[in-house]
Image (cartoon, grey):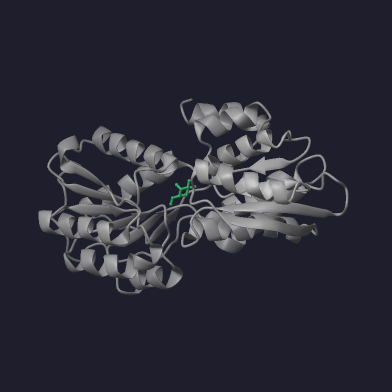
Amino acid sequence: MNKFSKVLLAGTMALGLGACSSKPAASAGGSAATKGGDYADKKVGIAIYQFNDNFMTLFRTELEDYLVSKGFDKSNITITDGANDQATQTAQIDNFITQGVDVMIVNPVNSSSAPTITDKVTSADIPLVYINREPDEEEQKRWKDEGLKVTYVGADARQSGTYQGELILETETKGDINGDGVVSYIMIEGDPENVDAQYRTEYSVKALTDAGTKVKELDDEVANWDQAQAQEKVQNALSKYPEAEVVFCNNDAMALGALEAIKAAGKTVGKDIYLVGVDALADALDKVEAGEMTGTVLNDHIAQSHGAADAAMDYLDGKDVDYKYVKDYVKVTKDNIADIKKSLGL
Ligand code: GAL
Protein backbone atom coordinates (compact mmCIF):
# COMPACT_ATOMS: atom_id res chain seq x y z
CA MET A 1 0.00 0.00 0.00
CA ASN A 2 1.54 3.33 -0.96
CA LYS A 3 1.54 6.45 1.17
CA PHE A 4 -1.47 7.94 -0.61
CA SER A 5 -3.58 4.84 -0.25
CA LYS A 6 -2.79 4.83 3.46
CA VAL A 7 -3.77 8.46 3.83
CA LEU A 8 -6.92 7.75 1.91
CA LEU A 9 -7.77 4.66 3.93
CA ALA A 10 -7.25 6.56 7.17
CA GLY A 11 -9.38 9.40 5.84
CA THR A 12 -12.06 7.02 4.71
CA MET A 13 -12.20 5.41 8.13
CA ALA A 14 -12.17 8.75 9.92
CA LEU A 15 -15.07 9.97 7.80
CA GLY A 16 -16.98 6.78 8.41
CA LEU A 17 -17.68 6.31 4.71
CA GLY A 18 -19.98 3.46 3.87
CA ALA A 19 -23.55 2.68 4.73
CA CYS A 20 -24.61 3.89 8.14
CA SER A 21 -26.04 1.44 10.54
CA SER A 22 -28.75 3.40 12.27
CA LYS A 23 -32.13 2.72 10.84
CA PRO A 24 -35.29 4.74 11.11
CA ALA A 25 -38.45 2.75 11.66
CA ALA A 26 -39.66 1.98 8.17
CA SER A 27 -43.09 0.83 9.18
CA ALA A 28 -44.59 4.14 10.30
CA GLY A 29 -47.30 5.33 7.92
CA GLY A 30 -46.88 5.61 4.16
CA SER A 31 -48.61 3.94 1.26
CA ALA A 32 -49.41 0.25 1.30
CA ALA A 33 -46.48 -2.01 0.54
CA THR A 34 -46.16 -3.26 -3.03
CA LYS A 35 -46.98 -6.87 -3.77
CA GLY A 36 -43.94 -8.71 -5.06
CA GLY A 37 -42.16 -5.61 -6.36
CA ASP A 38 -44.97 -4.57 -8.68
CA TYR A 39 -44.33 -0.88 -9.28
CA ALA A 40 -46.36 -0.35 -12.46
CA ASP A 41 -48.96 1.84 -10.77
CA LYS A 42 -46.61 3.60 -8.34
CA LYS A 43 -46.14 7.32 -8.85
CA VAL A 44 -42.67 8.80 -8.41
CA GLY A 45 -42.00 12.54 -8.12
CA ILE A 46 -38.41 13.53 -8.90
CA ALA A 47 -37.35 17.15 -8.30
CA ILE A 48 -34.01 18.09 -9.88
CA TYR A 49 -32.32 21.38 -8.86
CA GLN A 50 -31.76 22.37 -12.48
CA PHE A 51 -31.88 20.53 -15.82
CA ASN A 52 -29.10 22.70 -17.23
CA ASP A 53 -26.29 20.77 -15.51
CA ASN A 54 -24.20 18.12 -17.28
CA PHE A 55 -23.77 15.80 -14.32
CA MET A 56 -27.38 15.96 -13.13
CA THR A 57 -28.52 15.27 -16.70
CA LEU A 58 -26.58 12.00 -16.70
CA PHE A 59 -27.96 11.28 -13.23
CA ARG A 60 -31.64 11.86 -13.99
CA THR A 61 -31.51 9.96 -17.29
CA GLU A 62 -29.97 6.95 -15.56
CA LEU A 63 -32.45 7.23 -12.67
CA GLU A 64 -35.47 7.18 -14.98
CA ASP A 65 -34.10 4.32 -17.11
CA TYR A 66 -33.35 2.26 -14.02
CA LEU A 67 -36.82 2.81 -12.53
CA VAL A 68 -38.40 1.77 -15.84
CA SER A 69 -36.17 -1.34 -15.90
CA LYS A 70 -37.57 -2.19 -12.46
CA GLY A 71 -41.15 -2.11 -13.68
CA PHE A 72 -42.26 1.51 -13.11
CA ASP A 73 -44.42 2.98 -15.85
CA LYS A 74 -42.69 5.92 -17.50
CA SER A 75 -45.95 7.89 -17.45
CA ASN A 76 -46.00 7.62 -13.64
CA ILE A 77 -42.53 9.14 -13.27
CA THR A 78 -42.55 12.93 -13.19
CA ILE A 79 -39.22 14.78 -13.27
CA THR A 80 -39.26 18.53 -12.65
CA ASP A 81 -36.70 21.24 -13.42
CA GLY A 82 -36.20 23.51 -10.40
CA ALA A 83 -34.38 25.99 -12.67
CA ASN A 84 -31.96 26.65 -9.79
CA ASP A 85 -34.67 28.47 -7.87
CA GLN A 86 -35.84 27.15 -4.49
CA ALA A 87 -39.28 28.78 -4.69
CA THR A 88 -39.91 27.09 -8.06
CA GLN A 89 -38.81 23.74 -6.69
CA THR A 90 -40.87 24.11 -3.51
CA ALA A 91 -43.97 24.70 -5.65
CA GLN A 92 -43.12 21.55 -7.63
CA ILE A 93 -42.84 19.57 -4.39
CA ASP A 94 -46.21 20.97 -3.22
CA ASN A 95 -47.63 19.80 -6.50
CA PHE A 96 -46.26 16.27 -6.04
CA ILE A 97 -47.96 16.20 -2.63
CA THR A 98 -51.28 17.30 -4.15
CA GLN A 99 -50.94 14.67 -6.88
CA GLY A 100 -50.37 12.05 -4.17
CA VAL A 101 -47.11 10.57 -5.43
CA ASP A 102 -46.08 7.37 -3.61
CA VAL A 103 -42.45 8.36 -3.16
CA MET A 104 -40.33 11.45 -3.80
CA ILE A 105 -36.69 11.81 -4.87
CA VAL A 106 -35.35 15.33 -4.31
CA ASN A 107 -32.16 17.07 -5.42
CA PRO A 108 -32.66 20.29 -3.44
CA VAL A 109 -31.81 23.68 -4.94
CA ASN A 110 -30.57 24.77 -1.50
CA SER A 111 -29.52 22.07 0.94
CA SER A 112 -30.50 24.51 3.69
CA SER A 113 -34.14 24.12 2.60
CA ALA A 114 -34.07 20.43 3.50
CA PRO A 115 -35.79 20.84 6.92
CA THR A 116 -38.76 22.61 5.30
CA ILE A 117 -38.96 20.06 2.49
CA THR A 118 -38.68 17.16 4.95
CA ASP A 119 -41.52 18.55 7.09
CA LYS A 120 -43.85 19.03 4.13
CA VAL A 121 -43.23 15.66 2.57
CA THR A 122 -43.26 13.58 5.75
CA SER A 123 -46.44 15.34 6.99
CA ALA A 124 -48.08 14.08 3.79
CA ASP A 125 -46.77 10.60 4.71
CA ILE A 126 -44.67 10.31 1.56
CA PRO A 127 -41.22 8.65 1.82
CA LEU A 128 -38.40 10.94 0.72
CA VAL A 129 -35.00 10.20 -0.84
CA TYR A 130 -32.54 13.09 -1.05
CA ILE A 131 -29.88 12.91 -3.75
CA ASN A 132 -26.73 14.83 -4.79
CA ARG A 133 -26.89 17.73 -2.32
CA GLU A 134 -26.43 16.35 1.13
CA PRO A 135 -28.52 17.91 3.90
CA ASP A 136 -26.49 18.74 7.01
CA GLU A 137 -25.75 16.45 9.96
CA GLU A 138 -28.35 18.04 12.22
CA GLU A 139 -31.10 17.44 9.66
CA GLN A 140 -29.97 13.84 9.10
CA LYS A 141 -29.93 13.21 12.85
CA ARG A 142 -33.54 14.35 13.02
CA TRP A 143 -34.64 11.74 10.44
CA LYS A 144 -33.02 9.11 12.58
CA ASP A 145 -34.22 10.42 15.96
CA GLU A 146 -37.78 10.98 14.79
CA GLY A 147 -37.90 7.76 12.76
CA LEU A 148 -38.83 9.66 9.61
CA LYS A 149 -39.00 7.94 6.25
CA VAL A 150 -36.20 10.08 4.85
CA THR A 151 -32.78 9.11 3.54
CA TYR A 152 -29.83 10.57 1.65
CA VAL A 153 -28.23 8.55 -1.14
CA GLY A 154 -25.12 10.17 -2.52
CA ALA A 155 -21.43 10.62 -2.05
CA ASP A 156 -19.18 12.30 0.51
CA ALA A 157 -17.71 15.33 -1.23
CA ARG A 158 -14.73 15.37 1.14
CA GLN A 159 -13.48 12.22 -0.54
CA SER A 160 -13.57 13.81 -4.01
CA GLY A 161 -11.61 16.82 -2.76
CA THR A 162 -8.99 14.59 -1.15
CA TYR A 163 -8.62 12.67 -4.42
CA GLN A 164 -8.10 15.91 -6.35
CA GLY A 165 -5.27 16.86 -4.01
CA GLU A 166 -3.77 13.38 -4.33
CA LEU A 167 -3.85 13.64 -8.11
CA ILE A 168 -1.63 16.71 -7.83
CA LEU A 169 0.70 15.05 -5.28
CA GLU A 170 1.09 12.09 -7.63
CA THR A 171 2.50 14.24 -10.46
CA GLU A 172 6.22 14.29 -11.19
CA THR A 173 6.76 17.63 -9.42
CA LYS A 174 4.05 17.06 -6.76
CA GLY A 175 2.44 20.24 -8.04
CA ASP A 176 5.52 22.42 -7.61
CA ILE A 177 6.38 22.91 -11.28
CA ASN A 178 8.66 25.91 -10.75
CA GLY A 179 10.46 24.26 -7.84
CA ASP A 180 10.08 27.20 -5.43
CA GLY A 181 8.81 25.00 -2.61
CA VAL A 182 5.23 26.28 -2.82
CA VAL A 183 2.28 25.03 -4.89
CA SER A 184 0.54 28.13 -6.25
CA TYR A 185 -3.03 27.43 -7.28
CA ILE A 186 -6.25 28.86 -8.66
CA MET A 187 -9.50 27.47 -7.24
CA ILE A 188 -12.68 27.45 -9.34
CA GLU A 189 -15.78 26.75 -7.27
CA GLY A 190 -19.26 25.50 -8.09
CA ASP A 191 -21.95 27.43 -6.29
CA PRO A 192 -20.86 28.42 -2.79
CA GLU A 193 -24.06 27.27 -1.04
CA ASN A 194 -23.44 23.73 -2.26
CA VAL A 195 -21.71 21.40 0.16
CA ASP A 196 -19.95 19.61 -2.73
CA ALA A 197 -18.30 22.89 -3.70
CA GLN A 198 -17.38 23.71 -0.10
CA TYR A 199 -15.84 20.33 0.68
CA ARG A 200 -14.02 19.94 -2.62
CA THR A 201 -12.49 23.39 -2.20
CA GLU A 202 -11.38 22.62 1.34
CA TYR A 203 -10.25 19.00 1.03
CA SER A 204 -8.32 19.32 -2.25
CA VAL A 205 -5.99 21.82 -0.59
CA LYS A 206 -6.03 19.93 2.71
CA ALA A 207 -4.63 16.83 0.97
CA LEU A 208 -1.61 18.93 -0.02
CA THR A 209 -1.08 20.57 3.36
CA ASP A 210 -1.63 17.24 5.20
CA ALA A 211 1.23 15.85 3.10
CA GLY A 212 3.42 18.74 4.31
CA THR A 213 3.22 20.70 1.06
CA LYS A 214 3.23 24.50 1.24
CA VAL A 215 0.45 26.11 -0.78
CA LYS A 216 -0.46 29.58 -1.98
CA GLU A 217 -3.95 30.47 -3.15
CA LEU A 218 -3.60 32.96 -6.00
CA ASP A 219 -7.28 33.25 -6.77
CA ASP A 220 -10.61 31.68 -5.77
CA GLU A 221 -13.54 32.27 -8.12
CA VAL A 222 -17.13 31.03 -8.34
CA ALA A 223 -18.21 29.66 -11.74
CA ASN A 224 -21.45 27.90 -10.72
CA TRP A 225 -20.49 24.47 -12.15
CA ASP A 226 -20.57 26.07 -15.61
CA GLN A 227 -18.05 25.65 -18.43
CA ALA A 228 -18.36 29.10 -20.00
CA GLN A 229 -18.19 30.92 -16.67
CA ALA A 230 -15.11 28.92 -15.69
CA GLN A 231 -13.37 29.68 -18.97
CA GLU A 232 -13.80 33.39 -18.39
CA LYS A 233 -12.74 33.23 -14.74
CA VAL A 234 -9.62 31.20 -15.51
CA GLN A 235 -8.70 33.44 -18.43
CA ASN A 236 -8.73 36.45 -16.08
CA ALA A 237 -6.94 34.59 -13.32
CA LEU A 238 -4.15 33.42 -15.62
CA SER A 239 -3.58 36.90 -16.98
CA LYS A 240 -3.17 38.16 -13.39
CA TYR A 241 -1.26 35.14 -12.10
CA PRO A 242 0.72 33.54 -14.95
CA GLU A 243 2.82 31.78 -12.29
CA ALA A 244 -0.12 29.46 -11.38
CA GLU A 245 0.92 25.81 -11.18
CA VAL A 246 -2.45 24.17 -10.49
CA VAL A 247 -6.06 24.87 -11.42
CA PHE A 248 -8.48 23.02 -9.15
CA CYS A 249 -12.03 22.92 -10.53
CA ASN A 250 -14.89 21.66 -8.39
CA ASN A 251 -16.29 19.79 -11.43
CA ASP A 252 -15.37 18.68 -14.95
CA ALA A 253 -17.61 21.11 -16.83
CA MET A 254 -15.58 23.93 -15.27
CA ALA A 255 -12.30 22.06 -15.89
CA LEU A 256 -13.20 21.85 -19.59
CA GLY A 257 -13.71 25.62 -19.60
CA ALA A 258 -10.44 26.08 -17.69
CA LEU A 259 -8.64 23.98 -20.31
CA GLU A 260 -9.74 26.35 -23.08
CA ALA A 261 -8.40 29.31 -21.08
CA ILE A 262 -5.14 27.47 -20.36
CA LYS A 263 -4.63 26.74 -24.05
CA ALA A 264 -5.51 30.31 -25.02
CA ALA A 265 -2.82 31.51 -22.58
CA GLY A 266 -0.33 29.37 -24.51
CA LYS A 267 0.17 26.90 -21.65
CA THR A 268 0.33 23.11 -21.78
CA VAL A 269 -1.22 20.91 -19.10
CA GLY A 270 1.31 18.51 -17.59
CA LYS A 271 4.22 20.78 -18.53
CA ASP A 272 3.35 24.34 -17.43
CA ILE A 273 0.33 23.72 -15.24
CA TYR A 274 -1.85 20.96 -13.75
CA LEU A 275 -5.62 20.74 -14.07
CA VAL A 276 -8.11 18.55 -12.18
CA GLY A 277 -11.90 18.24 -12.08
CA VAL A 278 -14.60 15.95 -10.67
CA ASP A 279 -17.44 13.93 -12.30
CA ALA A 280 -15.71 11.94 -15.09
CA LEU A 281 -17.82 13.41 -17.89
CA ALA A 282 -17.07 11.68 -21.21
CA ASP A 283 -15.35 14.79 -22.61
CA ALA A 284 -13.16 15.11 -19.52
CA LEU A 285 -12.15 11.44 -19.74
CA ASP A 286 -11.02 12.06 -23.32
CA LYS A 287 -8.94 15.02 -22.10
CA VAL A 288 -7.35 12.95 -19.32
CA GLU A 289 -6.55 10.24 -21.87
CA ALA A 290 -4.96 12.83 -24.16
CA GLY A 291 -2.94 14.29 -21.27
CA GLU A 292 -4.83 17.60 -21.46
CA MET A 293 -6.21 17.17 -17.95
CA THR A 294 -4.07 15.85 -15.09
CA GLY A 295 -6.95 13.79 -13.79
CA THR A 296 -10.52 13.74 -12.60
CA VAL A 297 -12.65 11.93 -10.03
CA LEU A 298 -15.55 9.69 -10.95
CA ASN A 299 -18.76 10.93 -9.36
CA ASP A 300 -20.63 7.68 -9.78
CA HIS A 301 -24.03 8.73 -11.10
CA ILE A 302 -24.86 5.10 -11.87
CA ALA A 303 -24.30 3.84 -8.31
CA GLN A 304 -25.95 6.95 -6.85
CA SER A 305 -29.07 6.87 -9.06
CA HIS A 306 -29.53 3.11 -8.66
CA GLY A 307 -29.04 3.46 -4.89
CA ALA A 308 -31.67 6.21 -4.75
CA ALA A 309 -34.15 4.13 -6.76
CA ASP A 310 -33.43 1.06 -4.63
CA ALA A 311 -34.14 3.07 -1.46
CA ALA A 312 -37.40 4.34 -3.01
CA MET A 313 -38.42 0.78 -3.85
CA ASP A 314 -37.55 -0.40 -0.34
CA TYR A 315 -39.86 2.25 1.08
CA LEU A 316 -42.62 1.14 -1.30
CA ASP A 317 -42.04 -2.47 -0.25
CA GLY A 318 -42.25 -1.55 3.43
CA LYS A 319 -38.64 -2.56 4.05
CA ASP A 320 -36.16 -0.94 6.44
CA VAL A 321 -34.17 1.91 4.95
CA ASP A 322 -31.01 3.42 6.46
CA TYR A 323 -30.88 7.17 6.84
CA LYS A 324 -27.82 7.44 4.63
CA TYR A 325 -26.10 5.52 1.83
CA VAL A 326 -22.69 6.72 0.66
CA LYS A 327 -21.27 5.75 -2.72
CA ASP A 328 -17.53 6.00 -3.27
CA TYR A 329 -15.80 8.38 -5.63
CA VAL A 330 -13.00 6.91 -7.79
CA LYS A 331 -9.77 8.68 -8.69
CA VAL A 332 -9.21 8.76 -12.46
CA THR A 333 -5.84 9.04 -14.20
CA LYS A 334 -4.47 7.88 -17.55
CA ASP A 335 -3.66 4.58 -15.85
CA ASN A 336 -7.21 3.40 -15.08
CA ILE A 337 -9.12 5.31 -17.72
CA ALA A 338 -9.96 2.23 -19.79
CA ASP A 339 -11.65 0.57 -16.80
CA ILE A 340 -13.54 3.73 -15.90
CA LYS A 341 -14.81 4.18 -19.45
CA LYS A 342 -15.92 0.57 -19.52
CA SER A 343 -17.78 0.93 -16.21
CA LEU A 344 -19.62 3.92 -17.65
CA GLY A 345 -20.41 2.09 -20.89
CA LEU A 346 -18.27 4.50 -22.93
C1 GAL B 1 -21.96 17.81 -8.07
C2 GAL B 1 -21.38 17.66 -9.46
C3 GAL B 1 -21.52 18.95 -10.21
C4 GAL B 1 -22.96 19.43 -10.18
C5 GAL B 1 -23.47 19.48 -8.76
C6 GAL B 1 -24.91 19.86 -8.69
O1 GAL B 1 -21.88 16.59 -7.36
O2 GAL B 1 -20.02 17.34 -9.34
O3 GAL B 1 -21.08 18.79 -11.55
O4 GAL B 1 -23.73 18.55 -10.94
O5 GAL B 1 -23.30 18.20 -8.16
O6 GAL B 1 -25.37 19.87 -7.38
Whether residue 177 is visible:
yes
Image position of 279 (left or right of 52): right
Q: In front here: 220 or 241?
A: 241
Image position of 223 (left or right of 205): left
Whether residue 278 is visible:
no
Note whether 68 is above or below 129 in the view shown.
above
Number of numbered discs? 0
Q: In front here: 51 or 244?
A: 244
User: Where's residue 60, x and y in %?
Assistant: 34, 41
Looking at the rendering, which quadrant does residue 20 occupy?
A: bottom left
Note whether 193 is above or below 234 in the view shown.
below
Residue at image location 88% in from the left, 48% down from the top: 179
User: Where's residue 249, x and y in %?
Assistant: 59, 48
Residue at image location 76% in from the left, 46% down from the top: 242
> Outermost residue, right direction?
180
User: Where's residue 2, x and y in %?
Assistant: 76, 46
Note whether 81 is above or below 64 in the view shown.
below
Where does the N terminus fall, quadrant-wise? Answer: top right
Residue at image location 74% in from the left, 41% down from the top: 273
User: Where's residue 32, x and y in %?
Assistant: 13, 55
Q: In front here: 333 or 269?
A: 269
